[in-house]
Image (spheres, rainbow, N blue to C red):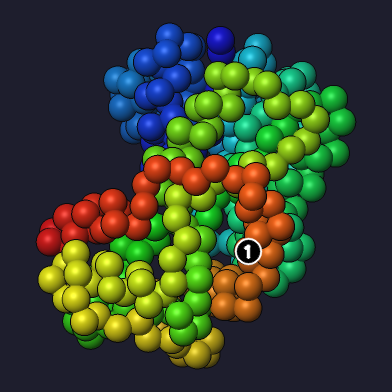
Amino acid sequence: MKYVITGSLGNISKPLTQKLVAAGHTVTVISSHEDRKAAIEALGAKAAIGSIQDVDFLTKTFAGADAVYTMVPPIFTASDWKKHIGDTGEIYAQAIKAAAIKHVVNLSSIGAQMPEGCGPVSGIYRVEQAFNTLSDVNIIHLRPGNFYTNFYANIGMIKHSNIIGGNYGNNTSVVFVHPADIAAAAAEELTALTFKGHTVRYIVSDERTTTEVAKILGTAVGKPELPWIDFKDEDSLGGMIGAGLPEEVAKNYVEMGKAVREGAMFEDYYKHKSEVKASKTKLEDFAKEFATAYKQ
């Protein structure tokens, strides 16, 4: 079959492409960077270089595909991050319709039931809504948990302050996922193409408390007593801005952290938890990868 993959050589799109190519499928990978063309072709895929903000480019690239995998990459320069994410979803939807695509696997997020109050995920809510206007397209929205890999941003904090933390709250239970598990689920859905209508699939690797996160990651890097510190929202905001994040992005991340702390982000997932099969990569598995990155 013929597939188009957005997301360039990202930590989901690259392994997804590798899986599809290995299975003998024809894969086109969209990237905005000309210098990634050779690396994409080295995977055995075709490279389509252009912008996902260009509906004509997308329509031309999507044409003839059996299915498309869509995702909205993080753009930290947007003046209104939620709007940017939602607008990108509208562009995708226009191209999907114009190219007469019949199957779409869309990378959404846990918490995407929230039209407001969940930072960038409330932008992804808008993407889902835009896609769901396509009545004659079969769409599955993949809603993964919080990425383990986001903890790489805490390495400096652990090294220099001997703490790990955020505004998630004390001993709060968090739903996590490994990007490799998302890629595996996306490949499964793309190769089977058994989904009909507009559906949601949650992808979850593990559920752990923030206390357990500190203990497991701390032990992996030789600091078994590493504490999880709960930051106030205003302190989280100031810390992110001080670390160089634009204020718009920092505000959205703080808002998402609040949704984690209050449980709103996981509310819909818990309603469907009995239907969700846990993926294979547990926090202890990721801790080994974290320790390797920590040593670099």
Q: In which quarter of the image is the N terminus?
A: top right
User: How far across and how far down the image is residue 181, in percent?
Assistant: 44, 41
* Closer to the camera in the image, 239 or 260: 260
Q: Residue at x 67, y 29 (%)?
A: 104
Left or right of 108, for residue 168 = left
Mark 1 neighbour density, 10 Å: few (under 14) some (14–19) many (20 or more): many
Left or right of 224, for residue 188 = right
User: How far across and how far down the image is residue 108, in percent?
Assistant: 62, 47
Q: Which residue in the structure is indicated by mark 1?
A: 266
Q: In which quarter of the image is residue 277?
A: top right
Q: Compared with residue 138, is residue 44 higher up or lower down, i.e. above or below? A: above
* Closer to the camera in the image, 38 or 23: 23
Amino acid type assigned to the residue bearing label 1 in the image: Phe
Left or right of 15, for residue 95 = right
Q: Residue at x 12, y 61 (%)?
A: 295
Q: Residue at x 50, y 67 (%)?
A: 174
SS type, badge 1: helix
Q: Residue at x 63, y 53 (%)?
A: 273
Residue located farthest toward the front when viewing the structure as drawn = 274
Q: Compared with residue 293, is residue 260 higher up or lower down, i.e. above or below? A: below
Q: Count the marks.
A: 1
Q: Quadrant of residue 242?
A: bottom left
* Closer to the camera in the image, 9 or 190: 190
User: How far across and how far down the image is residue 201, in percent?
Assistant: 64, 42
Q: Compared with residue 66, is residue 68 higher up or lower down, i.e. above or below? A: below
Q: In which quarter of the image is the C terminus?
A: bottom left
Work out whether residue 22 can be spotted: yes
Q: Quadrant of residue 164?
A: bottom left
Work out whether residue 60 can be spotted: no
User: How far across and how far down the image is residue 107, in percent?
Assistant: 59, 42
